[in-house]
Image (cartoon, helix red, strand yellow):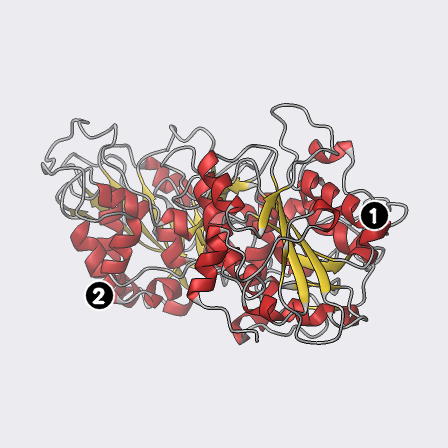
Amino acid sequence: MIMSPSNKMVKALMLGLTSFAFVEANNNLRGLRATSTGDHEPMDIVGFWHIDQSITGPTESRDQLVKKQGQEILNSYMFNEGLATGDYTLKLNYVTTDPLNDETRDFLRSSNAIQEHPPTILPREAGVNYFEYPTLIELHAFCQKPTNNDKIVFYLNTNYNDDYRVSFENYLLGDSCVQCMQNDKKQACGPWYTGTDGFYWKHFSGNYWMARCSHIAELNTPFYSDLLHEGHYPNFYPPTGRIFAKYWMMNDAGPRPERTQDMESIGHGLLERNQVCSDKWLFTKEQEGLDEVSKKEPEIDLKKLTNEDIVQGLWKGRFHNTEQIDPHTQNIHIAVSVCNSDLNWINELTHDYKISSIHIISKCGRPLINAPPDASIELLPNVGRNDHSFAYYISHILDGKLAETNSDPDNSIVMFLKDNNNSYQKHMHWSSMDEMISLAASEHGFSCGLFGDDVLSAYHVSDYLFQFSLNSHSRMTYDREDTTIAPFKSDFENLGHMLTVLHEKPRDGLLQVCYGGSFAASVTNIKKVPHVAWKGFEKVLSRGDNIEEGHFMERSWAALLSRPLERTEEHILHDYAYRVWRDDLFYLGALVARR
């Protein structure tokens, strides 16, 4: 009699006991087999788990992330309840080009379900990242053996994003794909199927999938030497660099086509929709499995995105539908935070624009030089720097400016500027006035004064970003008049804690961050944040001059005021990203692209 798996069975599995499953010895391959409950021949399922050589988690080391994902795998339906049905045998190979520590290796080995598969086929040079290709080549070679033609293989990797990874695992390692592959007409199964009705090539999101070895054996070898040097661009057919790994399973058989971005001449993959199973369908004529928010037409026309759009636009938070917006006809209110500078730059910057009001907040008690004659000027204590000034402006000044100028809140923007040229931000570049106004007036409702180079994205993984905290800052002893003496360190554990306490923590996922302290936002988006929250930000930022809360707020403006990304936009950015920035605290969580 087959009993349902219990926690004790899972524990036994973790300890390497065989009361629930035993070691499969055929072809010297260790695996798990459950007692069959029927007369049919069980499917033989073999997995390949790629462990990236440089992957890390939000707060974990590489080995900690591997152990966490290993536990997720071992707790899955496929490794527990599914085995009890007797419908399949199961083993999982993990492949890595950089050794795991002894503790992690022992943890995986003790399960009897997961074993190491050393990569031996692809010649490798020391210090070179070969991405997913060593594992895919081993999987391909496995399926090319005639004795494995009837086997089923599945593939997964060490995705750094917990939400995406667990979502992909839940589908791939749940009951859906196992049941799917029991239908001989199905060739592949995986989460978030992406089609070619508006995208360049078919694939399963995250590159998590299950397929028949008979299909895999017909594919080309998943590697060519130029993949490591040609850049990593998804919006080509075929894609380039490490992105080609996602393309391979559904598309790469026979002569490889000339690379193109012409949507009319792209191929449409090796598998028809009725040959695959999935939980969500993207870029198909009828998108299924998505919530209503994700089904709506996004502001960005994803069907027309080019690689240049991704690199220069979406990646940097700059690409939005602004073609019909005339920056010279927008109602513009300006809030300026100053300490000690000549303000003639405001006159130069605002020339030829429709400026409804200018409000200058002076923090240092020094004479203002060349202030615009029609500007209102307010003296405030030197606390919270520009972030306090802007929260104060929203809380106390904005509504009055809208009323006295008869400005339509739905057609007005606010530019938040400070008297600092951010010259220390060597890798940052200034946006033009036209661009800042047009982006803020678009449906996105936000624009940053500075944008980065091609490597660091404006978008950050929330799990990392919310962990940001500082114990000190190099400008703590900078001499200023009227400085309120206060310790730098706040009472908040981290950025996420502050946002939670003030009841305005943005949703999880990818969040835009605007560094430098100058930005523009639509009044509509400003009003979406409750007034009580702005008052809360103003209060915590009034604790002192150079304080940790100011660094928290700098990283919060864009997340609070910009339009949340569509899921498909997040999908494109995750595909384009190589890793998450953890090199230092200041850009913690930023998506990183390889040059």
Q: Position of residue 265 (x, y in %)?
A: 85, 55
Q: Position of residue 208 (x, y in %)?
A: 63, 56
Sequence-first tag of 1 and 2: 1
User: Residue 42, can we see it?
Assistant: yes
Foreground residue among 521 and 300: 300
User: Residue 431, can we see it?
Assistant: no
Foreground residue among 574 and 72: 72
| Identity of the residue drawn at 26% across and 63% down | 503
Please identify, in this view, whether the residue under mark 1 or under mark 2 is nearer the observer.
1
User: Does dot 2 land on a helix, a strand or a loop?
Assistant: helix
Give the Cα distance between marks 1 and 2.
64 Å
523 in relation to 51, above or below: below
Q: Position of residue 16 (x, y in %)?
A: 50, 51
37 in relation to 55, above or below: below
Which mark, by number, is residue 144?
A: 1
Residue type at mark 2 is Val
Residue 331 lies left or right of residue 126; in this view the side is: left
Q: Position of residue 389 (x, y in %)?
A: 23, 48
Foreground residue among 286 and 117: 117
Residue 260 lies left or right of residue 400; in this view the side is: right
Which mark, by number, is residue 566?
A: none
| Identity of the residue drawn at 45% across and 68% down | 6
Instruction: Classify mark 2: residues with Cα within 10 Å, few (<14), some (14-19) or many (20+).
Output: few
Residue 461 lies left or right of residue 261; in this view the side is: left
User: Does dot 1 land on a helix, a strand or a loop?
Assistant: helix
Instruction: Classify mark 1: residues with Cα within 10 Å, few (<14), some (14-19) or many (20+).
Output: some
| Identity of the residue drawn at 48% across and 34% down | 101
Q: Which residue is mark 2?
A: 532
Q: Which quadrant of the figure contains the N terminus?
A: bottom right
Q: Residue furthest top?
A: 126
36 in relation to 370, above or below: below
